[in-house]
Amino acid sequence: LPTYRTYTAGFLNRDLAAFLEPAPGAAVSFAGLYPDHFLSPAPKRRLRAWHLVGGLDWLSPDEITGLPPDDGHPYLLPDWIERDGLKCLKVKLRGTDPVWDYHRLVRVGDIALAHQVDWLSADFNCTVTDPAYVNDILDRLRDEHPRHYGMILYVEQPFPYELETHRIDVHSVSARKPLFLDESAHDWRLIRLGRELGWTGVALKTCKTQTGAILSACWAKAHGMTLMVQDLTNPMLAQIPHVLLAAHVGTIMGVETNAMQFYPAASEPEARVHPGLYQRREGMVDLGTLGETGFGYRVEEINRPLPPPSVDTGF
């Protein structure tokens, strides 16, 4: 039985009201509802793949320092786009240097337009403390490069993730673009606080636990918030629950997936069984090879050598 078919009243002995509370004043009740109420009954089998453009990534040949890697993989952004057919780019920014951040968005946007990329997202890396920092960059981009501005699908966690300590009113930012909690989104109570402060979306990560991600997704969707599933670089089997979460909760656009950028060889045994999950082709990842039990790993077919156990339990 697939894992996602067990999030129902038939398999769970308590409803969501045992775990979640609505926001004060919201016309929301979790009584009698189970996670399946908020999950897609027909999840997509192919998802748009977001590529991470790091702050130190080379965008063009003139930026290359030293000898580029000779491992058969791209090292310039245009080459990544062409090889993988990318349509979505997540742009890492500094959050402490508005001039650099603005010009980085412009340069990546120029490349995106030249290579038929559809969407960008801006990740300010939790370092901003004043909404005006983000607003000024977005407004300048809107005025000077309106096509680039239009390509920005959402803004990710510009502000410190300790929401309870940094209670910054961010309504002015989310009035410009959807604003997603990321590092703060590991608990539905923090999502509730974020919503009060003006955040409009939630970026989920399976590394913060599957249960936590499901509960956060249910709370957010019940309150009209948009979802995304972000990557903390999930290789090997970790990639599978990661993309399954995105397929089932329904995201603003696809899933971020970057293990194939940073250590593609790590997942070679899994890729032989699930090639579409470990290679981005036509800008997509493909879940079509997953099995019908649990997360669909098909682990018995994956020939992954394991190191000897570090402890002998005697069993």
Image: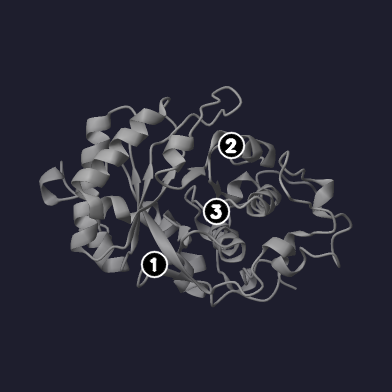
Q: Position of residue 132 (x, y in %)?
A: 36, 29
Percent coordinates x, y for residue 216 in the rendering: 66, 48
At horizontal 68% and vertical 76% (from top left) the residue drawn is: 292
**Residue 46 appears anywhere in the view:** yes
User: Which residue is disc 2 drawn over?
Assistant: 194
**Which dot, 1 or 3, sits closer to the camera?**
3
Asked if residue 58 shows in the view, the reply is no
Do labels 2 and 1 touch, CB within 8 Å?
Answer: no
The answer to which of 120 and 263 lies nearer the viewer is: 120
The kind of residue on which mark 3 rests is Thr
Q: CA distance from mark 1 to mark 3?
A: 24 Å
Disc 1 residue type?
Arg
Nearer to the camera, 159 or 204: 159
Nearest to viewer (mark 2 / mark 1) = 2
| Residue wearing tag 1 | 280
Q: Which residue is mark 3?
A: 226
Q: Please, is residue 36 above or below residue 100 in the view? A: below
Tag 3, which secondary structure?
Answer: strand
Tell me which label, 1 or 3, sits earlier in the chain.
3
Q: CA distance from mark 2 to mark 1?
A: 33 Å
Percent x, y for residue 144? 19, 45
Proximity of marks 1 and 3: CB atoms separated by less than 8 Å: no
Q: Residue at x 53, y 74 (%)?
A: 45
- Which residue is found at the position 45% from the left and 72% from the top? 276
Q: Are marks 3 and 2 in contact (CB under 8 Å)?
A: no
Q: Residue furthest left?
A: 62
Judging from the image, what secondary structure is the residue with disc 1 in? loop
Kindly report the distance in space between the C-alpha atoms of the residues bearing marks 3 and 2.
Answer: 13 Å
Looking at the rendered structure, which numbered label has been put on residue 94?
none
On the image, the x and y values in percent for residue 247 come to 57, 66
- The residue shown at (32%, 27%) is 96
